[in-house]
Amino acid sequence: MKVVYQTCCGVDVHKSFLVATIIKTTSGIEPSYHKKRFSTFNNSILQFKDWLIDNNCRDICMESTGKYWVPVYNLLEDDINVTIANPKWVKAVKGNKDDTKDSKWIGDLFRLGLVPGSYIPCKEIRILREYTRYRYKLTSSKSGEKNRFQNALTVCNVALDSVVSDVFGKSATSIIDYLIEQSDNSINHEEISSRLLRSLKKKSDSVIESIDGHQMTDSQKYRMRLIRAHMDYIISTINDIDTMIESLITPHENAIQLLCTIPGIDRNSAITIISEIGTDMSQFSSSKRLCCWAGLTPSNNESAGKKKSVRITRAGVYLKPALVQCAHAAVKSEKSPYYKTKYERILKRRGKKRAIIAIARMILTSIYQMLCTGEAWNPSDLYKIDMPEPLDAKQREKAIRQALKLLKSEGIIPESLEAS
């Protein structure tokens, strides 16, 4: 195999220490190995950096172990070319591995160019990514608290959700506040009716019937107050994060406006996408590579002429859900039927889930091209989408047979006529 890096370093990172092995290759001579162990404290990492520079080693590779690689990457990225490898590409053979051998194994694979590097955005995008991912987690927590609040109403014999469309709307919230503030389980029908707004006033009898005879105890009311307080805190935190995100996204405002021209993508979705892939598409060799990195490309698993499972990978745990959500919005868009038409065509052949993943991949491909060229969304086949596809010979023959069959069944042409 051809040696790609004459001098490189393999690093095995842990929480409190790292083991590094510098590999130097000279023509005609076996490579030499220099191993050393460092702490993960900042001063020790800087000593590791000086050791690399003294040995004229500017290319290193380390496994992405949790978040332990991040402090090392932060201090080395300015002067050293750091390649972060997915663990599946550098996994050593079980039964013959330890910390020292791991660093040597990583270095040997990297020296021969067998380790594809993972995409690591610039520090500015990494900080933005931390906020958007934290916002995603808080949004999930808010949904969880809403489910707990709803469950608390159900176990207290309050069937308000069967009448109102949103239990957390103004009218429903006002009624629940009234029930929690009551010292006993009795309710005032006139008070309940006065708290209903707009169209719910017509359903006052159903609302009263859904909460009449509820079984709220003091302990259950206290639990509901705790859930609501936590939910209010999460909402206020999300608002603070949104304010911070708006200040961080200012340098990329043009890219955000560009992505918002795609059907199904709003501002929040555009910010999430930018925080995951950045704006510099030179990191990805092609749109196919980007789609593969995002986990939207079917895998390839074939052996002995048999093609096994080709499901999409588990990559893109934050980007893929955002793109799927955009795809669902795009296929329902009334302003532009572009993705809707493509979705319906794929739906007939492959089903709903595969069709949505295909639309998500189309959107990501468009994003790649738009960030590369700086042009707004305008696919080449946009004006052909409403035109019928031309039929090939087999499809044309089948259409003629079906037309003749219909005409014969209606008695428009005689049964003895044969299709030409």
Image (spheres, rainbow, N blue to C red):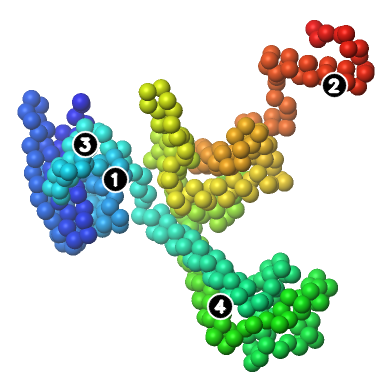
Report x, y in % for residue 101: 14, 44
To which residue does mark 2 refer?
406
Q: CA distance from mark 1 to mark 4?
A: 42 Å
Q: Of callouts 4 and 2, which one flags the residue occurring earlier in the amino acid sequence?
A: 4
Q: Residue at x 62, y 83 (%)?
A: 216
Select label 2 or label 3 by which is in front.
2
Q: Of callouts 2 and 1, which one flags the residue occurring earlier in the amino acid sequence?
A: 1
Q: Residue at x 73, y 81 (%)?
A: 212
- SS assignment at label 4: helix
Q: Residue at x 22, y 37 (%)?
A: 110
Select label 3 or label 1 by which is in front.
1
Badge 4 density bin: few <14, some 14–19, many ≥20, Cα 10 Å: some
Q: Amino acid at mark 2?
A: Leu
Q: CA distance from mark 3 to mark 1?
A: 12 Å
Select label 3 or label 4 by which is in front.
4
The answer to the question of whether label 3 and label 1 lie on touching residues, with beta carbons closer than 8 A, is: no
To which residue does mark 4 refer?
228
Select label 4 or label 2 by which is in front.
2
Q: Of callouts 1 and 4, which one flags the residue occurring earlier in the amino acid sequence?
A: 1
To which residue does mark 1 refer?
87
- In the image, 373 versus 47, the foreground residue is 47
To which residue does mark 3 refer?
109
Q: CA distance from mark 2 to mark 1?
A: 61 Å
Q: Residue at x 87, y 8 (%)?
A: 417
